[in-house]
Amino acid sequence: MRAVVQRVKHARVTVQGETVGQIDKGLLIFLGVEKDDNDSDLNYIADKAAGLRIFEDENGKMNLSVQDVGGSILVVSQFTLHGDCRKGRRPSFIRAAEPDAAKRYYDLFIEKIGGMGIPVAQGVFQAMMEVSLINDGPVTILLDSRKTF
């Protein structure tokens, strides 16, 4: 499982011109599910993202988590995070999970984040979405449950 985590001042996702999810201060997480992902991968990414100390404390140091600052999380599914561009110029998505499995883990991820007491918003799985954000910092963190980077 892979995630691109961005610290944001505001983020919004729309489908066909309608806002389906939005947050103010918090994290925008693009989530990609891989074929062989399991509950361990899900728990690793959810716990790591929720606990990332990437918000500034009173001394200006990145020392606080989204929970510490009372922020929210917007989760957007993105199978293209598993695009392999090492060969040729057209990405291969062979490692991305099939839609049914990916949706299951996407929904479980959102449920797990919400279960931590973090307000969570979401995009629409498999929809063509437009995402707008104000990245705060900018701060962008890459997470991979297999720790490949």
Image: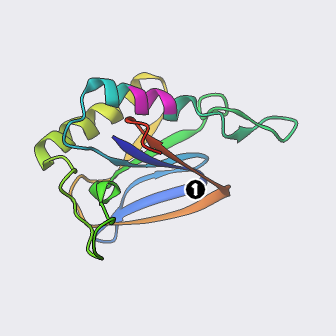
Looking at the rendered structure, the secondary structure element under dot 1 is strand
Name the amino acid type tagged 1: His
Q: Residue at x 60, y 53 (%)?
A: 8
Instruction: Find the magenta span and give its range.
Output: 44-48
In the rendered image, the quadrant that contains the N terminus is top left
> From the viewer's perspective, is 5 left or right of 14?
right
Name which quarter of the figure residue 88 lies in. Answer: bottom left
Q: Position of residue 72 (x, y in %)?
A: 53, 40
The answer to if 68 sits in the magenta stretch is: no
Considering depth in this image, is 99 or 134 the residue closer to the camera? 99
Q: Residues within 10 Å of mark 1 (few under 14, many from 20)?
A: some
Q: As drawn, which residue projects farthest toward the front?
A: 87
Residue nearest the viewer, comparing 58 with 121: 58
**Residue 47 forms part of the magenta stretch:** yes
Residue lying at the far bottom in this picture: please name it: 89
Q: Residue at 33% x, 65% y: name it.
A: 86
Q: How many marks?
A: 1
x, y percent for residue 139: 64, 52
Magenta segment's dominant SS is: helix
Q: Position of residue 118 (x, y in %)?
A: 49, 30
Residue at horizontal 23 percent and vertical 52 percent from the top? 125
**Percent coordinates x, y for residue 63 in the rendering:** 73, 32
Identify the residue at horizontal 47%, vertical 35% (top origin): 119
Within the image, what quadrant is residue 129 found in?
Answer: bottom left
User: Would you place residue 129 above or below residue 11 in this image?
Assistant: below
Classify 50 as above or below 35.
above
Relative to 89, say whether 149 is above or below: above
Residue designated by label 1: 10
Color theme of the render: rainbow
